[in-house]
Amino acid sequence: METLKMKDWGLGLGEQVVIAGPCSVETEQQIDSLCESFKGKSEINMFRGGVWKPRTRPGNFEGLGEEALPLLQKAKESLGIPICIEVANTAHVEAALKHDIDVLWIGARTTVNPFSVQEIADSLKGVDIPVMVKNPINPDMALWMGAIERLHAVGIRKLAAIHRGFADPYDKIYRNKPNWNLAMQLKLELPNIEIINDPSHIGGKASMIKDISQRALNFGMDGLMIETHPNPKEAWSDAKQQITPNELLSMLKEISFREKIDMETEIPANLKELRESVDHIDQKLIDLLSDRFHLIDQIGAYKKVHKLSVYQGARWQSVLADRIALGVKKDMSEKFMKSLLVAIHDESVKRQEKQIASKDATAKIL
Ligand SMILES: O=C(O)C(=O)C[C@]1(C(=O)O)C=C[C@@H](O)C=C1
């Protein structure tokens, strides 16, 4: 799928993009104050503002609507950077285009609905505007890709994705739990697509934004979208997750952006050597695992003949505790050791169950 990277959108963006601005546009004074703080700050590359807010239940502030758009136009003039807003239907798209909005994004609650995405895509036929697609609420790769593909099919080439995390009713830490692997998978499926991270919606709390941002950069994400408000406590929506412009600017100094080198084609010599050693060790690990499973098969054969149960709780518990302790002594985390051993044990149990179910002559041994 041919798409253009952000630096080729003709908006003066670089390889990594920081988008800042309020959850919702509230008043002229609020936008003026943010512009005052961001004026001349080259770290901020795009200004965002919520115009229509899709609230879960009615009765909350649902955005200023079209009234917000002239305020954003004023911010564009004052800051000299592109403006982006969320659109959820054709009317939003029309209003955004009428007010010279530079970049649109499709929100998580819209990405889940292919009818809505198609409606937006149809209204953008023949329009040259960049569109960013937030992940759907649920971790469904096909829906996320599908939305991007629908926009591509009507001729939009300036496309990017936004990782804002996924709803998880069992999670107690995040507002929307990040799924770094799924987000990175999107890059493998659609190699040219860049991904912006939205730590405000992932964390849901101002205090989590810095760590989530750093993680996103460590995963190679291409930018950050961070909600900022001159006085977060007084914000009309999402008060807990907004930070002040000064907090954002100092956070940007503290986190470390990563270099964008393609490690496959421009690999430095010493790294190449290290990777070869890793390849060698992985080969040994696989040989050792195969040896272990060979022994497991022999135990399986014995269990089959003697009608013993596959799962041996006492032995398994002692193996687990012993190996975790050995791993921890070698500076590996308990969590990692446990998940590694559980994976190995699950495979042992599956192999032995298969052996017992098979009609083949029982065993070569024992
Ligand atoms: O000791 C056994 O009985 C085995 O089959 C080996 C093994 C293991 O993988 O270590 C597998 C299954 C049992 O639940 C306990 C341990």
Image (tube, rainbow, N blue to C red):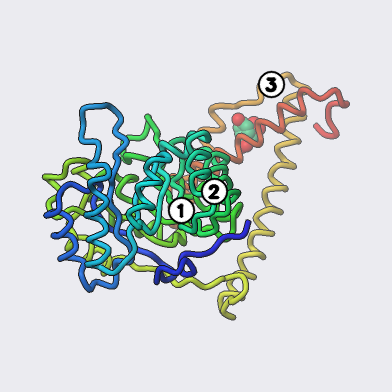
Question: Residue 270, position in %: x, y?
Answer: 56, 79
Outermost residue, right side: 361
SS of the residue under disc 2: helix
| Residue 83 image point, x, y percent | 32, 59
Residue ID at (61%, 41%): 344
Q: Residue furthest bottom?
A: 269
Against 259, residue 314 (above or below) is above
Q: Which residue is mark 2?
A: 151
Query: What's the distance in space between the residues labelled 2 and 1, CA to CA?
Result: 8 Å
Location of residue 155 in the rendering, given as x and y in whole percent from the top left corner: 58, 54
Using a 10 Å C-alpha cutoff, classify the residue at mark 2 as few (fewer than 14 neighbours), some (14 to 19) or many (20 or more).
many
At label 2, which amino acid type do we have?
Answer: Leu
Q: Amino acid at mark 3?
A: Leu
Q: Which residue is mark 3?
A: 308
Q: Quadrant of the C terminus?
A: top right
- Count of marks overlaid on the render: 3
In the drawing, does residue 333 fall left or right of residue 229?
Answer: right
As drawn, the label of residue 174 is none
Q: CA distance from mark 1 to mark 3?
A: 61 Å
Q: Quadrant of ligand 1?
A: top right
Q: Is residue 320 in view from this perspective? A: no
State which mark lies toward you, 1 or 3: 1
What's the residue at 64%, 59% (across, down)?
Answer: 282
Residue at numbered disc 1: 131
Please tell me in which quadrant of the rendered image residue 278 appears. Answer: bottom right
Question: In the figure, is residue 244 to the left or right of 51?
Answer: left
Mark 3 surroundings: few (<14), some (14-19) or many (≥20) residues within 10 A: few
Per the image, label 1 sits on a secondary structure element best described as: strand
In the image, 209: left or right of 115? Answer: left
Q: Nearer the viewer, residue 134 or 89?
A: 89
Beta carbon at label 3 within 8 Å of ligand 1: yes
Left or right: 145 with respect to 230? right
